[in-house]
Amino acid sequence: MPPAAYALVTLFVACSVVVGIVAVRLAARVGGPTRRLAYLLPVLAGFGAFYLIGHKLGLSVGPEVGLFGFQVALLGDIAIGFAAALVAALVRAAVVRVRRPGPGTGEAPAAG
């Protein structure tokens, strides 16, 4: 794999981390967890969307720009990655909300 491909993958990993962090912070507003482990699933979902859309399916959403010698639909890919990360964070928030005990049950909160 040429060095330019490594640079592109590194860029998408960095974008995945950023969209995952933003998605978790938004999901935290509706009761989602904010522990370090809560960031893993949205980051992986964002990167998985980048991989599936751009590499496996070869779809191009939005205008393409030249990046490290490749034609990349960066804005569309980031939007799709953010959507996937947000869905993952919101699903996790919903699961955590459902698993939390009601007031007065005397149970300890579930880890999440």
Image: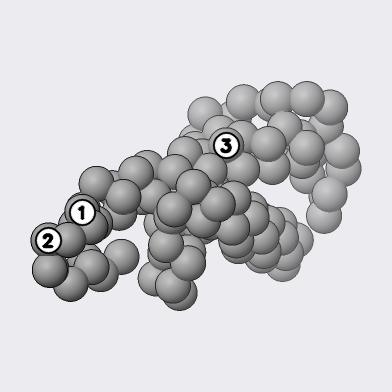
Disc marking residue 83: 3
| Image vertical order of residue 83 relative to residue 5, above or below | above
- Mark 3 → mark 2, Cα distance in angstroms: 36 Å
- Where residue 65 appears, as percent x and y from the top left, is 87, 38
Q: Nearer the viewer, residue 38 or 57?
A: 38
Question: Badge 3, how many Cα within 10 Å: few under 14, some, many 20+?
Answer: some
Question: Badge 2, how many Cα within 10 Å: few under 14, some, many 20+?
Answer: few
Residue receiving disc 1? 102
Closer to viewer: mark 3 or mark 2: 2
- Where residue 105 appears, as percent x and y from the top left, is 12, 61
76 relative to 38 in the view: left or right: right
Residue positioned 64% across, 55% down in the render: 22
Residue 31 in view: yes
Q: Residue 9's image quarter? A: bottom right
Disc 2 residue type (three-letter) = Thr
Closer to viewer: mark 3 or mark 1: 1
Residue positioned 44% across, 53% down in the render: 31
| Image vertical order of residue 110 relative to residue 58, above or below | below
- Where residue 68 appears, as percent x and y from the top left, is 82, 55
The answer to whether marks 2 and 1 mark residues whose Cβ atoms lie closer than 8 Å is yes
How many numbered marks are there?
Answer: 3
96 relative to 101 in the view: left or right: right
Residue 13 in view: no
| Image vertical order of residue 67 relative to residue 21, above or below | above
Disc 1 residue type (three-letter) = Gly
- The residue positioned farthest toward the front in the image shown: 104
